[in-house]
Amino acid sequence: MDLIELLQYAFFRNALLGSLFASIACGIMGTYIVTKRLVFISGGITHASFGGIGIGLFFGISPIISAAIFSILSALGIEWLSKRNDVREDSAIAVFWTFGMAIGIIFSFLAPGFTPDLSAFLFGNILTITTGDIIFLAVISAIVTIFFIMFFHPIVYISFDREFARSQRMPVVFFEYLMMVFIALTIVACLRMIGIVLAISLLTLPQITANIFTHSYKNMIWLSIAIGYIGCLGGLLMSYTLQVPSGASIIFFSILIYVICKLGKNIYTVKSRN
């Protein structure tokens, strides 16, 4: 079966659309995460979201909705605790990371009736995303894009020099809390695609690959979106060809892109010096 034939299937078209919107949201938010060095915090939010999934299964509501609420509360909690002088940032992350996973495991096992396959949430499967998931991703990517266009310069100042932003009387704390909410929503929106275990990768791998070629914040966003989408497309084709999970394939292909770009840049640098 070639690519043209695959496009005739609704699940594959959904995967392509989902990949596009996820690449936009993750490309924008991931650039903020990498430049502000929030990778570990984002990992804590990602794993804490499992608590919301377990609660959703227990009470019979949408796991994605409950995961979104739980992730937002966890993100705000981590941000609040990490700003306190009596709590270290890594300790605050560990509290919500482990609490979310514990709550998720307990409530998922206590859930009445048939419990869905939790591996779908842990490792994701882009081929199972629904129209509702695509709409959620589209809305998140649109909101994040509009917000960054409107407040691009304050976000850049806060990302690189928080104290300078405060000296310019920017609402730094408000922006930081709001960005944590956006990070949480972006992570939850991508859960069905690549799962809890791998979600943080889509928020970091395209960015560090883009950073090989540019140090401009704006260019890094554009490159991250493009690299993220290429990684998703390559992972989809790899998943179909080898019959392996799509989430892991996307991340593997994204890492492959990074390695090729890094080696290519190093070779070019050595040759240019000689």
Image (tube, helix red, strand yellow):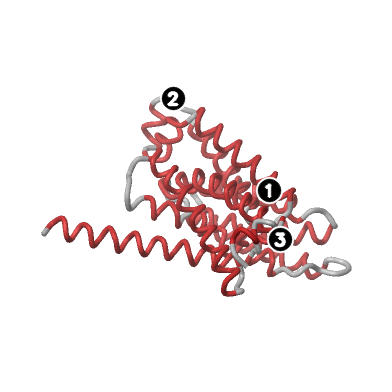
Mark 3 or 2, closer to the camera: 3
Characterize the local packing of mark 3: few (<14), some (14-19) or many (20 or more) Cα atoms within 10 angstroms. some
| Amino acid at circle 3 | Thr
User: Disc 3 marks which residue?
Assistant: 128
User: Disc 2 marks which residue?
Assistant: 169
Of callouts 3 and 2, the N-terminal one: 3
Is residue 113 found left or right of 156 in the rendered image?
A: right
Quadrant hosting residue 63: bottom right
Mark 1 or 2, closer to the camera: 1
Residue 245: numbered disc: none
At x 36%, y 32%, the residue is 164
Image position, residue 73 (x, y; %): 66, 47
Characterize the local packing of mark 2: few (<14), some (14-19) or many (20 or more) Cα atoms within 10 angstroms. few
Residue 241 vertical placement versus 78 (above, below):
below
Q: Secondary structure at mark 2?
A: loop
Of callouts 3 and 1, the N-terminal one: 3
Image position, residue 21 (x, y; %): 59, 46
Residue 26 vertical placement versus 177 (above, below):
below
Is residue 104 found left or right of 203 in the rendered image?
A: right
